[in-house]
């Protein structure tokens, strides 16, 4: 155990003024010989879990805390000039109960007390004090303020109140921060502490890592407050001592009060919060009482669903697949997950809320298809369950769902009603300072002329995940400037110091979390514009085992539904899509280049590709969606050739044919990689998925190992064959090697067929509507762009090329939106216009 | 299979249905006021005339800007007044209504409110003043529609020029789009083969070819190149679609005043066919589209002596009248100078030819 621990630290997640990167803190602590460190950001706990993980990785003990704002009166009081005078207070969690209480307090600060800042009050501080240690904070702490104002009695009163509530867990905080008022305050604080018999604790209120970082920190303050370094009234701290000091420095400074130093260690010993990762916590789901277990209910839904989809006598293949999936779902403990998802989708479908046929890998599950979570037959299109739920890999399955844009909120409301409004929340997301952005910001703050800043920023390549460091390696011109130009060096050095730090918080567009207990028991909450979201980002929530769903709003679903409604209204027809999705009249649209308005197929390039390809089945559409991306695009000519000259496909080995013939010899899908590995080398699909992942992420060591297994198989110590390998299956090693190479090269571009298939279904449906009910379809499409004057002309052009007249707005005939009017069978209507728009004006 | 076959009318079902433009899509017209307009109409019947409309929606949050936009978009064309009349009158009418309402609220009963329907209508005529105006020229009406709706709807400004445009141009937007498709169909190696199969003959257009294209300018975007030279991206719309025309500095300066939005122009330029980009035209010159070709008579007097020149001068002056049909230029070496207009006939051509020689009399 070291002899000093920092208990008051601000990280990059103190968005206004913290410049400590989370991952740097435990590393630095260790360097300086400390084995524990705390995190206390302003009013928030955004970084708590990342901090915890980073500390554990370094073998440093994490102390989870927060520097809260305390309202002068009640947290509900929000009067100008009175209630904006809040105080600071440090809270540290001793144990998991303390963490829960801290989370609660921080949440209430936002939900109830937000007024310029998230503020708690004494009422809830007392209510939720258990498991928390309390420090009197910096100069903005209530005790300090009172002392500095000469209000000795008041200061004592406040201190005694805290002592009463927190008992031995309340400490008077003295700081070594170089600010002159602090020196005076320290003296008075020690006096008060001794008088009232309250223990002392020493901190440094660190906002950055090392003394040299103080300048960067000032620049950060300018960026976040919109000032420049040259502004006189910019926010500044007037000290360069707010860094993570070494124990020696702290001990030396406070040598008159060794107990303040010792107490930091004592406090650290008291703090032991543990988080559990990977353990799924699902909300409570109630099944109808006649079913003894959840599984019984689930099984009934599955059985009924299989019959509904496949008839009274489904084939053995189907039944085997269904049984297999059910057993895996049960074994991995996901029955409730399926039920929860089934439940809200079922609600949507029975309440006129359009739901997409699926998204992502979920369509690979026959059970999902049976109980109508998804709407595409995995058997027919070769979609794999293991791509969705891999029994050989522990991870939560992930059903993301598309809802019609207009009604997405209704589904969220349903879920909130069912599981409790405080059990459902949106999810936070952070905008970070990207390389180009931070260069511009730093330049502005340092009064570097705009043109120069712009030029410098543009020298950073426009790639995803680019950093200034990488750019200096890649761009010689930039590197030279850095060496020769002082200003450039200064700007870039500071920029690198701030790059990647979070800049502001906002709400993720589609993420929802649904929890067993109220959300704020696990995760503190944040409020912005009346919207509540979690303070941890999506991936963190998943690591904590919480149920996260993506509810996406898809405008196309709205267009489809609106079209169906218009057709019903206009022609009294109930639209029914053909189940086979093979209507030639529909495919004609792609063949003739009339893809305008068709989901996923509207771009010029995609239109031309389809016109060339002449698709006539859903598989072609699925391939189209998958291939038309940078990378796989190179295979497009081969695919087209393969379709136009059937029977001429070349395969490295004949065993590839049944797998690749559906894509004319090209490797297009991740599922195909999995199938190859299974069919040729005898892998289980679960392991095949792991191989695919390793290839996709270029995990060279795993790949090398699997190459060997793929070719020659794997045998256990007793000589039993675990994996036969290609050679045992009669495929020569040379071909096997070549095939492995092809897969490895291609795996990073391979597309998830389930996802592509779902989108192809949506595309087919939009095309079907366009082919049979063009007027209604175009009207619905135009309506989805209401208010967007840019897009309207393009779709009106399309109307005209389809032979649909556009009638001018009339006060006695028009509605708010575009509508369809029946002109009867007047002769002039039946004239074909052939792209000549002028003939179609009224 | 598929309900598409349940129809009794013809195959191209789209042709029997038309799409009615929504009021909410009109610029400066918000959803809420329009919803009120439609609701009021559904509750109490169609609007009988403009006054009826104004009176009924006066309380519904429909402001003057909204009404102005509706007028411009042609929403009231079915009523007897011209758009220009309505534009000049609507504010006054709305003011009258508003002050009437104020009086109502303060309890004052207007004598306008007593009496039969007929009397009321007569009273309305006294109460509300229309400032009558002749309708705006078609061109202006179409401009307003373009502004309010984003498209031309009750005609196209180029319609009346259709045949003239066809006569004077050698390419239109449909052909430009076809070139795009041919270019990008080179995705498959067999693309070129297919292209030749389909075309049957030698392609009509090639990169760099000189073309003439005409249409109406819908937007002009000026930019400065690295060398600080001006250039412009001009979007021009013909009867079939829009095309991008690129003007470098020379062309830009030459085109001068013709480069104005809503101007109908003739583009003289070269085709730029690119593999990875849409086909555009690089302009040499953009000028106002004339109904007739501007013919010029060039008299080459490089080798002429003074007496010949005198005779020409006299002839030009003599043949210049009230009705001229050609511009006359005299040419010395490469220098051409304008020197008036005349009414040219074959005889006059012969006369000039006699004076300075047949080879020196050229029409261009």
Image: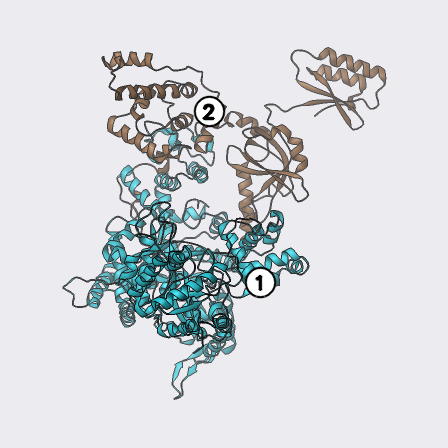
Chain colours: A cyan, B brown
Give the left or right position of residue B235, taking residue A429 as reference.
right
Q: Nearer the viewer, residue A212 or A325?
A: A212
Q: Disc 2: which chain?
A: B
Whole-percent x and y of residue A179? Answer: 50, 60
Q: Up-down: is B322 above or below B359?
A: above
Which quarter of the image is occupied by the C terminus of chain B? top right
Q: Position of residue A238 (x, y in %)?
A: 52, 57
Tell me the element at label 1.
helix
Q: Is residue A361 above or below residue A694?
A: above
Q: Which residue in the structure is indicated by mark 1? A: A470
Can you identify the residue that label 2 sits on? B141
Apparent side of residue A826 relative to residue B344 in the rendered image (left or right) = left
Task: Identify the residue at horizontal 43%, vertical 20% (top origin).
Answer: B84
Q: Nearer the viewer, residue B31 or B287?
A: B31
Q: Residues within 10 Å of mark 1 (few under 14, many from 20)?
A: few
Where residue B274 sits in the image (x, y, percent)? Answer: 60, 47
The nearer-to-camera label among 1 and 2 is 1
Label 2 Cα neighbours within 10 Å, binned few <14 / some 14-19 / many ≥20: many
Same chain, labels 1 and 2: no
Q: Position of A298 compared to A522: left or right?
A: left
Between residues A133 and A20, which one lies in front from this camera angle?
A133
> Residue B208: in sight, yes or no?
yes
Tell me if I can see residue B193 in this picture: no
Q: Quadrant of residue B359?
A: top right
Q: Residue furthest left?
A: A290
């Amino acid at each position: 155990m070291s002899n000093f621990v920092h208990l008051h630290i601000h990280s990059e997640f103190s968005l206004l003024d913290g410049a400590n990167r989370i991952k740097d803190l435990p590393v630095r602590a260790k360097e300086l010989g400390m084995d524990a460190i705390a995190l206390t950001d302003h009013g928030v706990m955004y970084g708590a879990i990342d901090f915890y993980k980073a500390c554990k990785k370094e073998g440093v003990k994490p102390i989870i805390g927060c520097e809260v704002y305390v309202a002068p009166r009640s947290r509900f009081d929000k009067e100008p000039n009175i209630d904006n005078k809040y105080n600071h207070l440090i809270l540290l969690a001793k144990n998991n109960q303390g963490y829960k209480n801290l989370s609660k307090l921080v949440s209430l600060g936002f939900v109830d007390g937000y007024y310029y800042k998230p503020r708690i009050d004494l009422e809830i501080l007392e209510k939720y004090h258990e498991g928390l240690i309390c420090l009197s904070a910096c100069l903005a702490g209530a005790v300090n303020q009172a002392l500095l104002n000469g209000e000795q009695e008041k200061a004592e009163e406040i201190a005694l109140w805290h002592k009463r509530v927190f008992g031995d867990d309340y400490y008077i905080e003295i700081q070594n921060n170089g600010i002159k008022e602090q020196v005076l305050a320290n003296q008075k604080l020690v006096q008060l502490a001794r008088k009232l018999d309250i223990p002392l604790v020493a901190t440094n209120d660190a906002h950055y890592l090392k003394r040299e970082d103080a300048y960067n920190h000032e620049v950060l303050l300018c960026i976040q407050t919109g000032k420049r370094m040259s502004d006189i009234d910019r926010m500044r701290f007037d000290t360069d001592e707010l860094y993570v000091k070494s124990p020696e420095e702290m001990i030396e400074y406070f040598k008159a009060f060794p107990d303040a130093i010792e107490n930091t260690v004592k406090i650290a010993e008291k703090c032991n919060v543990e988080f559990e990762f990977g353990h799924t916590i699902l909300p409570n789901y109630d099944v109808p009482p006649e079913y003894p277990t959840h599984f019984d209910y689930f099984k009934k839904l599955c059985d009924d669903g299989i019959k509904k989809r496949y008839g009274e006598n489904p084939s053995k293949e189907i039944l085997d697949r269904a049984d297999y999936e059910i057993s895996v779902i049960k074994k991995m403990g996901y029955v409730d997950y399926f039920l929860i998802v089934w439940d809200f989708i079922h609600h949507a479908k029975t309440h006129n809320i359009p739901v997409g046929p699926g998204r992502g890998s979920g369509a690979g599950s026959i059970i999902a298809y049976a109980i109508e979570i998804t709407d595409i037959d995995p058997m027919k299109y070769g979609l794999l369950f293991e791509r969705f739920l891999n029994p050989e890999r522990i991870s939560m399955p992930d059903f993301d769902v598309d809802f019609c844009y207009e009604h997405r909120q209704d589904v969220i409301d349903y879920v909130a009603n069912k599981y409790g409004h405080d059990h459902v929340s949106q999810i936070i997301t952070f905008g970070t300072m990207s390389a180009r952005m931070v260069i511009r910001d730093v330049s502005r703050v340092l009064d570097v002329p705009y043109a120069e800043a712009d030029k410098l920023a543009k020298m950073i390549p426009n790639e995803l995940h680019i950093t200034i460091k990488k750019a200096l390696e890649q761009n010689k011109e930039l590197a030279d400037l850095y060496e020769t130009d002082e200003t450039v060096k200064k700007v870039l050095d500071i920029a690198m110091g701030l790059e990647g730090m979070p800049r502001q918080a906002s709400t993720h567009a589609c993420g929802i979390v649904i929890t067993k207990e109220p959300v704020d028991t696990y995760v503190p909450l944040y409020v912005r514009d009346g919207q509540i979201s979690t303070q941890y980002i999506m991936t963190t929530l998943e690591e904590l085992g919480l149920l996260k769903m993506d509810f996406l709003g898809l405008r196309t679903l709205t267009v489809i539904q609106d079209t169906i409604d218009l057709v019903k209204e206009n022609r009294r027809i109930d639209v029914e899509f053909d189940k086979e999705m093979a209507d030639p009249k529909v495919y004609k649209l792609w063949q003739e280049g009339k893809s305008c308005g068709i989901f996923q197929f509207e771009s010029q390039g995609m239109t031309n590709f389809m016109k060339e390809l002449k698709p006539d089945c859903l598989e072609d559409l699925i391939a189209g969606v998958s291939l038309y991306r940078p990378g796989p695009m190179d295979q497009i000519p081969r695919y087209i050739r393969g379709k136009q000259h059937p029977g001429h496909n070349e395969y490295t080995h004949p065993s590839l044919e049944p797998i690749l013939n559906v894509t004319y010899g090209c490797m297009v899908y991740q599922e195909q990689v999995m199938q190859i590995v299974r069919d040729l080398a005898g892998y289980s699909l679960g392991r095949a998925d792991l191989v695919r992942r390793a290839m996709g992420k270029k995990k060279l060591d795993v790949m090398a190992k699997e190459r060997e297994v793929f070719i020659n198989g794997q045998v256990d110590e007793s000589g039993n064959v675990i994996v036969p390998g290609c050679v045992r299956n009669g495929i020569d090693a040379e071909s096997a090697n070549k095939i492995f190479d092809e897969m490895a090269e291609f795996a990073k571009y391979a597309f998830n067929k389930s996802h592509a298939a779902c989108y192809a279904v949506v595309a087919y449906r939009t095309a079907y509507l366009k082919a049979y009910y063009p007027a209604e379809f175009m009207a619905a499409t135009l309506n989805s762009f209401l208010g967007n004057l840019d897009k309207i002309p393009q779709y009106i052009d399309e109307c005209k090329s389809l032979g649909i007249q556009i009638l001018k707005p009339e006060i006695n005939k028009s509605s708010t939106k575009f509508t369809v009017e029946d002109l009867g069978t007047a002769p002039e209507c039946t004239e074909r216009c052939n792209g000549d728009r002028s003939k179609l004006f009224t | 299979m598929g309900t598409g076959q349940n129809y009794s009318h013809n195959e191209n079902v789209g042709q029997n249905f038309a799409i009615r433009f929504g009021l909410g899509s009109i610029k400066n017209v918000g959803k809420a006021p329009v919803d009120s307009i439609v609701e009021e109409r559904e509750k109490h019947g169609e609007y009988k005339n403009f006054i009826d409309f104004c009176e009924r929606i006066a309380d519904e949050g429909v402001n003057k800007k909204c009404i102005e936009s509706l007028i411009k978009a042609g929403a009231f064309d079915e009523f007897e007044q011209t758009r220009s009349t309505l534009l000049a009158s609507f504010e006054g009418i709305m003011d009258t209504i508003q002050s009437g309402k104020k009086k109502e609220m303060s309890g004052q009963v207007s004598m306008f409110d007593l009496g039969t329907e007929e009397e009321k209508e007569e009273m309305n005529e006294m109460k509300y003043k229309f400032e009558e105006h002749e309708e705006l020229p078609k061109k202006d009406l179409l401009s307003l529609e373009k502004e309010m709706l984003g498209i031309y709807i009750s005609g196209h400004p180029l319609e009346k020029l259709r045949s003239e445009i066809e006569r004077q141009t050698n390419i239109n937007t449909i052909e430009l789009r076809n070139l795009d498709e041919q270019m990008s169909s080179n995705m498959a190696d067999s693309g070129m083969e297919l292209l030749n199969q389909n075309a049957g003959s030698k392609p009509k257009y090639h990169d760099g070819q000189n073309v003439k294209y005409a249409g109406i300018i819908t937007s002009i975007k000026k930019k400065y190149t690295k060398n600080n030279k001006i250039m412009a991206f001009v979007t021009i719309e013909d009867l079939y679609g829009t095309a991008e025309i690129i003007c470098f500095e020379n062309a830009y300066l030459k085109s001068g005043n013709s480069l104005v939005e809503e101007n109908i122009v003739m583009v003289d330029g070269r085709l730029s066919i690119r593999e990875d980009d849409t086909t555009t035209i690089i302009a040499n010159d953009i000028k106002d589209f004339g109904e007739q070709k501007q013919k010029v008579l060039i008299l080459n007097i490089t080798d002429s002596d003074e007496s010949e020149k005198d005779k020409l001068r006299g002839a030009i002056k003599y043949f210049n009248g009230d009705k001229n049909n050609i511009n006359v230029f005299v040419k010395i070496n490469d220098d051409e100078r304008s020197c008036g207009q005349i009414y040219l006939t074959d005889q006059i051509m012969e006369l000039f030819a006699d004076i300075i020689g047949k080879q020196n009399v050229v029409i261009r």
